[in-house]
Image (tube, helix red, strand yellow):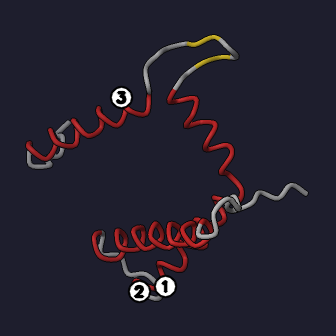
Amino acid sequence: MFLTPIAAPSEPWTILVDILFFFLASAACAYYFYYYKRKDLLGKFWGSTFVAGIGALIVFATLQTYIRDVIMWLMSPKIGSTQLSNVNLVAIFLGGFIALYIMNRINHNKERRD
C-alpha cells in the first residue's frame, strides 16, 4: 500500500506547522458557514471545525496528488512536452471572477429578468 507522508521530516516544527495549517483552514471554513452564511450546523462552530478538519484530512490523503497535477497544468498548460500557452489559467480565471464579482456588487446584486 502506498503511504504519503503528511510532512517532510526536514525541520522539527514542520509537523506542528502542518497541523496548524489544517486547523486554521478548517476553522476558516467553519467560520464561513457558521457565521457568514449563518448555517445551523451540528456542534455549532467547534463541531463544524472538527467536521471540516476531517473532510480536509480525507481529501488531502486521497486527492492531493491529482489536485496538484491539475493546478500545475492550469498554471502551465501543456500536452506532453508541448507548451500550449504561456498564460497562467488560474490567474486569468481568478482575475475574471473578481472583476465580475465587483461589477455585480456595484450593480447592487440584482437578479436577471428573463
Tags 1 and 2 in contact by the CB under 8 Å rule?
A: yes
Query: At label 3, which amino acid type do we have?
Result: Ile
Label 3 SS: helix
Q: Earlier in the sequence, mark 3 or mark 1?
A: 1
Quadrant containing the N terminus is bottom right
Label 2 SS: helix
Which residue is depicted at the point 47% across and 79% down? 48
Marks 3/1: CA–CA distance: 36 Å
Query: At label 1, which amino acid type do we have?
Result: Gly
Question: How many residues crowd mark 2 within 10 Å: few (<14), some (14–19), many (20+)?
Answer: some
Query: At label 2, which amino acid type do we have?
Result: Lys
The image shows residue 4, relative to residue 69, as above or below, that is: below
Question: How many residues crowd mark 3 within 10 Å: few (<14), some (14–19), many (20+)?
Answer: few
- Which numbered dot is residue 47? 1
Give percent across and percent down for residue 28: 39, 69
The image shows residue 46, relative to residue 62, as above or below, that is: below
Give percent across and percent down for residue 85: 49, 14
Location of mark 3 (residue): 92
Location of mark 2 (residue): 44
